Image (tube, rainbow, N blue to C red):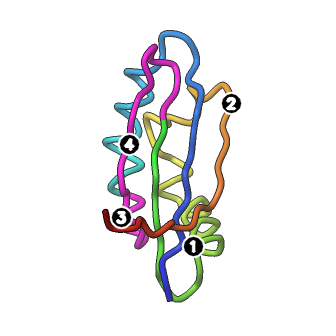
Amino acid sequence: MAPSIQIRVYRIKPGKMRESLDGWTRGVVPLRRKHGFRILGAWVSEPGDKFVWILSYDGPQGFEAADAAYYATEDRKVLDPDPAVHVAHGEKWFVLEVPLESA
């Protein structure tokens, strides 16, 4: 079974990108990994008000159950700094890989 892959795009509040990235890098990334997620990449738009990241999960309970369990942990509830406080708007969706034809 292929892993579930999700893209997340967040518009960060003006002037808060550095703080948001600090909380994400020091808190979210290690905690996600601890719970079996893989971070496939992360980017900041130019101009820098959007944060885009891709994560995957291929564990036995499925992405949505693992995601809910992650948010329910005490570690996530007390995450400090919490980058979520800097998010003005967010979107997320699952994606499927499209095989590229060889040239």
Give the residue at mark 3: 33
Q: What amino acid is labelled 3 in the image?
A: Arg
Instruction: Give the class, few, some or many, for how many residues have Cα within 10 Å of label 2's Cα (few <14, many ≥20).
Output: few
State the residue in front, 19 or 80: 19
Give the residue at mark 2: 89
Instruction: Kindly report the distance in space between the C-alpha atoms of the residues bearing marks 2 and 4.
Output: 17 Å
Give the residue at mark 1: 66
**Of pointers 3 and 1, the one earlier in the residue sequence:** 3
Seen in the picture, residue 16 relative to 86 is either above or below; the reply is above
Residue 20 percent coordinates (x, y): 44, 29
For the residue labelled by badge 4, is the local secondary structure a helix, a strand or a loop?
A: strand
Seen in the picture, residue 20 relative to 52 is either above or below; the reply is above
Range shown magenta:
31-51
Q: What amino acid is labelled 1 in the image?
A: Ala
The label on residue 42 is: 4
**Of pointers 4 and 3, the one earlier in the residue sequence:** 3
Q: Residue at x 48, y 39 (%)?
A: 52
Residue 88 percent coordinates (x, y): 66, 25
Q: What amino acid is labelled 4 in the image?
A: Ala
Viewer-side label of 2, 4: 4
Cβ atoms at labels 4 and 1 below 8 Å apart:
no
**Of pointers 4 and 1, the one earlier in the residue sequence:** 4
Q: Residue at x 51, y 19 (%)?
A: 49
